[in-house]
Amino acid sequence: MHDHEASDRLASFADVLAGELPGAWSSTHHRAGHREALAEVDERIWDLDLVTDSLATHPLRQAAVLSRPDGAQLVVIDRYDGRGGFLIAAIAPRDLPDEAYRGVPEPNGIAVTDDPFLAAGQVAGDLLARYEAALAQVRDNALDAIVPSQSDRVVLTWQPDGSLAAAPVGDTAANVLAANGFVKQEQTGVYRLSGDDTTEQARAVRATGQQLRAHGIATALQHPSGRITPTAAAPTAPPAPAAPRASAARSR
């Protein structure tokens, strides 16, 4: 089979599959040559079994990513065991910290036939159910590391990578955080401020505190020791970054 025939076959299968899955799914096809997109997909495949074994001997040359509005994603890739059909795996969310995945079993992928209608039943009844359970656990783990805010106080919590995270209550606090560089994680609703540039981080925290105070909202800083203190000034003692971990989602 020519490469373009295989590519069209996978894309067509994924398009029909997306329409048959429960919920609103869309399909994006990454063809050979889309190196950056394929590398990102490969990095985030959430599997330590069938799909990982296949990728070890057959590097990703094309893929179709199925996406749902809430951020859930699946990937469809070619199958090379001579049985026809495709492999389908979950994709780990990009905006959740590595620490949240610890202790969560991978929702390993499945092999399906080349009939997208039958495959939809396999995905919905097996992979999707395990994926949803794993996602819920990872999201809960991510939130466990965030000290809750109140309507009259936003708590900024240090993260192992030196960033600050907050779970604001109400649109006013959320808008102030977003205006000062905090990025909302769609999977959890948590706002994170990078610690890559500590000078910029300090400036953002000062501005955030001043603007929240103007709305009658206090700001507090959750130190690594667990002690919470009010703050309107720059944070001064971030925790040491966590040791580097394998970046591939399948190794989480």
Image (cartoon, rainbow, N blue to C red):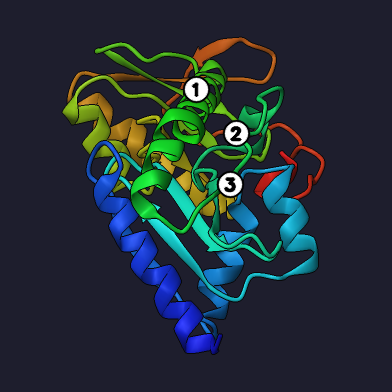
Q: Position of residue 71 (x, y in %)?
A: 36, 43
Which amino acid is tagged 2?
Pro
Question: Which quadrant would residue 122 be assigned to in this image?
Answer: top left
Which amino acid is tagged 3?
Gly
N-terminal label among 3 and 1:
1
Q: CA distance from mark 3 to mark 2?
A: 31 Å
Neighbourhood count class around disc 2 (C-alpha, 10 Å): few under 14, some 14–19, many 20 upward:
many
The residue lying at 77 percent from left, 53 percent from top is: 53
Q: Nearer the viewer, mark 3 or mark 2?
A: 2
N-terminal label among 3 and 2:
2
N-terminal label among 1 and 2:
2
Callout 2 secondary element? loop
Q: Nearer the viewer, mark 3 or mark 1?
A: 1
In which quadrant is the C terminus drawn? Answer: top right
Q: Position of residue 134 (x, y in %)?
A: 54, 26
The residue lying at 54 percent from left, 82 percent from top is: 32
Find residue 7 and name its label: none
Which amino acid is tagged 1?
Ala
Q: CA distance from mark 3 to mark 1?
A: 31 Å
Find residue 195 and name its label: 3
Q: Which residue is mark 2?
A: 107
- Residue lying at the far front in this picture: please name it: 83
The residue lying at 30 percent from left, 33 percent from top is: 210
Q: CA distance from mark 1 to mark 2?
A: 9 Å
Q: Position of residue 52 (x, y in %)?
A: 73, 52
Considering depth in this image, is 116 or 247 the residue closer to the camera? 116
With 183 as the anchor, is 201 left or right in this view? right
Considering depth in this image, is 26 or 103 the residue closer to the camera? 26
Find residue 133 and name its label: 1
**Mark 3–mark 2 contact, CB under 8 Å?**
no
**Mark 1–mark 2 contact, CB under 8 Å?**
yes
